[in-house]
């Protein structure tokens, strides 16, 4: 599964790398938690891993909404594989996490055979799409246009999709779920 929040014009961040506009409402966050709960392994590139590792300890900070504590538990319970040529092994500071120097489609296929996978990050997802390893696409369309940034979906890859679910949230976010056909 590839899952991401994207601006309406198709970017995961703006041209300066900011993604503060993508912070989910409690309703959206609860929905995301439920969608990710059955995922056993998360695949990340370096940048997304560095962003996500805050979830290792975020639930220890008092005063967080319950949905944050829930997501932190879901994140910690998942195995994580980080693909990076630049990170050193001592930069992996979270439990249940291993570092791989490169995306290996055959190894990801073996991981897929053992359980549900989440591909996190547009760069890594482009490799997974190119290797035809993505079975589902989950997009959370945020009600914002940012004009430029990192595209949510890869260029140079063709994938036919079938819409299997959609939902509109109170904050204007729209969720769409596609099967790759």
Image: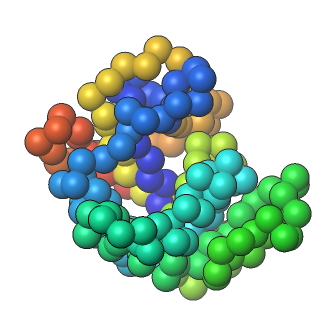
Q: Based on the displayed image, in which of its 4 quarters is residue 16 positioned?
A: top right
- Residue at image point 32% right, 36% down: 141
The one nearer the camera, 126 or 19, is 19
Q: Residue furthest left?
A: 170
Q: Is residue 149 above or below residue 152?
A: above
- The answer to whether residue 163 of the structure is visible from this angle is no
Q: Position of residue 179 (x, y in %)?
A: 38, 55
The one nearer the camera, 38 or 158, is 38
- The answer to whether residue 141 of the structure is visible from this angle is yes
- Residue at image point 38% right, 33% down: 21
The one nearer the camera, 54 or 117, is 54
Q: Is residue 133 left or right of residue 40?
A: right
Q: Position of residue 106 (x, y in %)?
A: 75, 69
Q: Residue furthest top?
A: 147
- Residue at image point 46% right, 67% down: 58
The one nearer the camera, 130 or 37, is 37
């Amino acid at each position: 599964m590839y899952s991401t929040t994207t601006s309406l014009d198709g970017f995961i961040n703006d041209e300066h790398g900011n993604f503060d506009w993508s912070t989910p409402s409690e309703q959206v966050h609860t929905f995301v938690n439920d969608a990710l709960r059955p995922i056993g392994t998360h695949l990340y590139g370096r940048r997304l891993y560095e962003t996500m590792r805050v979830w290792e300890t975020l639930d220890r900070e008092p005063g967080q909404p319950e949905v944050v504590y829930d997501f932190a538990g879901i994140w910690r319970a998942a195995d994580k594989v980080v693909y990076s040529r630049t990170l050193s092994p001592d930069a992996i500071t979270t439990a249940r996490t291993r570092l791989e120097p490169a995306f290996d489609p055959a190894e990801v296929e073996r991981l897929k055979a053992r359980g549900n996978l989440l591909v996190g990050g547009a760069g890594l997802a482009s490799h997974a799409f190119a290797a035809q390893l993505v079975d589902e696409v989950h997009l959370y369309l945020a009600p914002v246009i940012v004009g430029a940034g990192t595209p949510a979906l890869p260029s140079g890859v063709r994938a036919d999709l079938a819409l299997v679910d959609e939902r509109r949230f109170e904050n204007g976010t729209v969720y769409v779920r596609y099967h790759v056909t």
